[in-house]
Image (spheres, coloured by chain):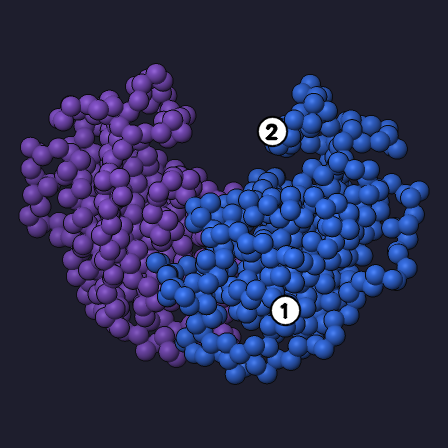
Chain colours: A purple, B blue
Amino acid sequence: VARQALGNEVSRLKAPSTIPYTDDEDAAKPAYYTDHSKPMHDRMEAYVLDLQDRLVTALESLDPSLQKFVRDRWERSDGHGYGISCVLQDGAALEKAGVNVSVISGTLTPGQLKSMRDRRAQTAKLLDDSEQFDFRVAGISVVVHPRNPYAPTAHMNYRRFEVFRQNAPEGEPPVMAWFGGGADLTPAYLFSEDAEHFHQTLKDACDAHDSSYYPRFKTWCDKYFTNIHRGETRGIGGIFFDDLDDKEPEQLFRFAYDAGNAFIRAYVPLVARRMAMPYTQRERDWQLIRRGHYAEFNLVYDRGTKFGLMTPGARIESILMSLPLTARWEYMNEPDPDSPEDRLLRAVRTTTNWTR
Amino acid sequence: VARQALGNEVSRLKAPSTIPYTDDEDAAKPAYYTDHSKPMHDRMEAYVLDLQDRLVTALESLDPSLQKFVRDRWERSDGHGYGISCVLQDGAALEKAGVNVSVISGTLTPGQLKSMRDRRAQTAKLLDDSEQFDFRVAGISVVVHPRNPYAPTAHMNYRRFEVFRQNAPEGEPPVMAWFGGGADLTPAYLFSEDAEHFHQTLKDACDAHDSSYYPRFKTWCDKYFTNIHRGETRGIGGIFFDDLDDKEPEQLFRFAYDAGNAFIRAYVPLVARRMAMPYTQRERDWQLIRRGHYAEFNLVYDRGTKFGLMTPGARIESILMSLPLTARWEYMNEPDPDSPEDRLLRAVRTTTNWTR
């Protein structure tokens, strides 16, 4: 039943000729960008809400069926935060896409503190063993799984994390604060020009702030997004960083702002470029096999997912929103040598410099 | 495309009227059962190979397309063992089924020793911290995912594990040896009579050896096969045990023999009963969502899977053979109250006594 060719149906899709709401370099900056009087946490919150809105609008413009994202606002039952989940499922262009914002606060558990201290000597020094600490975080988390096998999956995530002395008075500065995040691309079929566009756009955003960022964060991304048991990266990489506090918060915020905005320009045009290409069940099956590997990474290795699954009271639907709508595990699937599928495999078994 | 009704195609299937090769209680016992002169490891190896053969034959009899299992024999590159993987994929009755035997030996890693000692005080006492130990294990591992959403998925696994002083001379008895295993059922739709048949058949096999086994091993099964993050058991349970060495090896071997044989009678008739029932895309989608949860358990919690993924040189294809051919993750899928889907959810959110 599922074996017929799908090319005809799909090639009726038409990509939009322009994508709205990509940011304009010359446009006036938003208030949260220019108003230095507000706490950085509040400015980050305003930014991720704005970015969510612009990204959702850009992604909706792709869908010729005019299907819209469903927006859910949820509050934590303990009053310690809220989130806005925007999800589009079973669309003509996008099989599943989630754009989540969450703004959460609380007390760090011993397990969370240990994991932060283990990650970094600086943290171990500043967050004393004998004390307790509160935190707050504002972040955006995005996964897009297009329907067309030639259109790549992408993931993006930016967050600012602040740690406070427990029950610190309102307005006391955090003991520590850092930015984390990144963006990476996971195609089922490799188009060098797509990989180059994605990486170069991110590199340009990085280079405007620090020429060491892109090479460091690209390497970090390749290392982090690896299905160790398969000896394969999840996709063809991008950038990834955590615990970033090596510059003034204002400078780092501007970097996160530029990197988050760059994601729209880096990714959305790639879906527009590929979403109407004809394909058959062969390409669809391969896409679903690669999505099985995507699910493997998220369930076996991803720190955020594992952390979320182990947190009592966490919102499982938001945590597992990153999983594809459909995935496939075929025993002993091995592409023919030099086939397009084999070319993708070779790309995820090595690392490539995709930029100028 | 994938949304059309599937009922017509499937109802053309015809279940077999008899299932061959279920064991006959009155038949002569095989040589490995009666010949006490052979080492227990060799008898267990002969048993799991025999059980594999009988189970594969019984499962093949279900498939009206006469599709056969593909049999792969593999050897570990270090010479420390072999396995036989029997896999049927994309059949008319069975969407994916794997029946694996493996017979492996080696030296226990510090991690493996720690995990065994942590599990059990007895092991910590007998396997001294300052020494190294060798092991050998013979086992069978089975997962069957039928195509029809009304036919349940099942898993079965029996193994005998032996631990030796390192480089012990041939013939020296093991420092420790135990049996482990079990069988459990994962329906997408609940039929009480199927649950009762499965559990009662396993209970009868247990009761013939020790009336405490079934209640202990049923509770263990419910506890082990739990998606903690969802507050749901993977399915409706069965039996599960590990480190079993509370009787003479001969008695425990006879128990494993009976329990393994009982799986064929407990499970294969359920597939025959359900495989030709008409269904629509609604039931198929629900089945795939449940298979998503199945994949979650195996990738996030299952001890054997995690252990395998972390073992350098392990055969990933055999370890992940347990994953379904297709799985689906829908955001915020919530069945209507009192629908058949909701009835299944209620069954996996509680524990039920399915036996007399």
Image x and y of residue B292, in percent: 47, 57
- Please, what secondary structure does the residue beneath circle 2 have? helix
Residue B271 image label:
1
The residue to which callout 2 is attached is B118
Residue occupying the far front of the picture:
B356
| Quarter where residue A72 is shown | bottom left
B272 left or right, relative to A212? right
Badge 1 crowding class, 10 Å Cα cut-off, few under 14, some 14 to 19, many 20 or more, is many
- Please, what secondary structure does the residue beneath circle 1 have? helix
Mark 1 to mark 2 CA distance (whole Å): 39 Å
* On screen, residue B208 above or below A57: above
A323 left or right, relative to B268? left
The chain under label 1 reads B
Proximity of marks 1 and 2: CB atoms separated by less than 8 Å: no
* On screen, residue B305 above or below A136: below
Q: Is residue B241 visible?
A: yes
Q: Residue at x 56, y 77 (%)?
A: B277
Q: Residue at x 65, y 60 (%)?
A: B198
Q: Residue at x 69, y 18 (%)?
A: B130
* On screen, residue B318 above or below B326: above
- Mark 2 residue type: Asp
* On screen, residue A96 above or below B150: above
Counting residues from the start of the chain, the first of labels 1 and 2 encountered is 2
How many numbered discs sit on the rendered protein? 2
Q: Residue at x 34, y 47 (%)?
A: A315
Q: Is residue A346 visible?
A: no
Image x and y of residue A312, in percent: 38, 40
The chain under label 2 reads B
Residue closer to the observer: A340 or B101: B101
